[in-house]
Image (tube, rainbow, N blue to C red):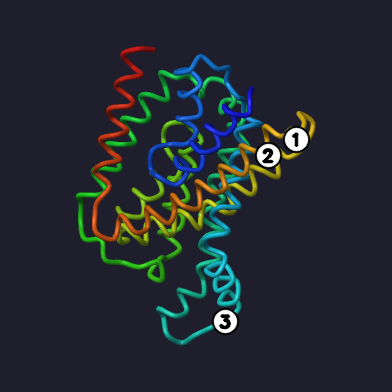
């Protein structure tokens, strides 16, 4: 892999990790477009480390507040629920961690089939569309309950299949539960931190054994930068607009690859 390829894939990862269009799907499909070799799961995890730094960089004040509030009790139910956000994030991370542990071999092999990615791009896009048009979306993150955390966590576990989109499926689940478009994205991005960190730590020996060179570093840096700005853009975008543009993109992309693959 050349450094230009690494930069392109790093930017792709940073943008698509947080936009609901599937980062893993794009990292499989883009090499197919240009005739590149599959970069492999270790390099993909290295790019995820970049987006981890991007999301921490954007939400570090939120995380400081979350950890501070985790040890505070309030008689006010809303305030007390806000203080439980850290525990809800941990609970919501558990299903994804189990899925990663038990389905790792499939994630590295049969789940990376381009046809499967194309189908999941379309199907998960339809799910995102339905969640976006159904019901009122007026709840905030502070209203999340244990049940909500479990349901969003189960949705996140499905994202082990490339093309589903971790952000897309968790945003959809949160909107089904009544969270606003912005708060659904906000909660999804907070959930990204522990799941990406965990996957990165598990695969860290593989990354180190394969060698950390300029190609890895370039991918990491561009992934972090692109991730930071994609978060900033999406949170501003969904304050006034819906997710329809991403639904259309997913369906068109999935159909194009089904035709040409």
- In front here: 79 or 38? 38
Residue 185: x and y, percent?
39, 55
Residue 70 badge? none
Q: Earlier in the sequence, mark 2 or mark 3?
A: 3
227 versus 211 height, above or below: below
**Which residue occupies 36% across, 30% down?**
121
Residue 72 badge? 3
Q: Are marks 1 and 3 in contact (CB under 8 Å)?
A: no
**Viewer-side label of 2, 3:** 2
**Which residue occupies 50% across, 25% down?**
28
Q: Residues within 10 Å of mark 1 (few under 14, many from 20)?
A: few
Image quarter of the N terminus = top right
Q: Residues within 10 Å of mark 3 (few under 14, many from 20)?
A: few
Q: In the shown orientation, is residue 157 left or right of residue 144?
A: right
Q: State the CA–CA distance, disc 2 to disc 3.
A: 40 Å
**Viewer-side label of 1, 3:** 1
Q: Residues within 10 Å of mark 2 (few under 14, many from 20)?
A: some
161 versus 83 height, above or below: above
Residue 132: x and y, percent?
25, 49
Residue 212 badge? 1
Name the residue at the right extreme.
Answer: 209
Q: Earlier in the sequence, mark 1 or mark 3?
A: 3
């Amino acid at each position: 892999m050349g450094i230009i390829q690494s930069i392109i894939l790093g930017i792709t990862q940073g943008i698509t990790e947080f936009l609901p269009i599937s980062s893993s799907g794009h990292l499989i499909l883009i090499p197919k477009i240009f005739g590149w070799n599959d970069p492999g799961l270790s390099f993909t995890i290295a790019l995820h480390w970049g987006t981890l730094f991007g999301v921490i960089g954007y939400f570090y004040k939120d995380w400081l507040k979350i950890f501070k509030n985790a040890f505070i009790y309030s008689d006010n139910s809303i305030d007390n629920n806000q203080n439980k956000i850290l525990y809800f994030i941990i609970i919501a991370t558990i299903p994804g961690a189990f899925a990663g542990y038990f389905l790792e071999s499939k994630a590295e092999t049969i789940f990376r089939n381009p046809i499967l990615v194309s189908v999941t791009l379309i199907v998960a896009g339809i799910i995102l569309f339905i969640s976006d048009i159904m019901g009122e979306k007026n709840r905030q993150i502070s209203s999340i309950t244990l049940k909500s955390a479990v349901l969003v966590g189960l949705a996140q576990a499905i994202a082990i299949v490339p093309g589903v989109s971790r952000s897309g499926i968790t945003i959809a689940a949160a909107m089904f539960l009544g969270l606003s478009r912005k708060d659904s994205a906000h909660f999804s991005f907070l959930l990204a931190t522990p799941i990406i960190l965990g996957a990165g730590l598990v695969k860290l020996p593989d990354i180190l054994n394969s060698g950390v060179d300029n190609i890895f570093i370039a991918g990491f840096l561009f992934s972090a930068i692109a991730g930071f700005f994609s978060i900033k853009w999406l949170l501003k975008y969904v304050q006034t607009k819906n997710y329809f543009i991403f639904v259309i993109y997913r369906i068109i992309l999935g159909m194009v690859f089904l035709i040409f693959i």
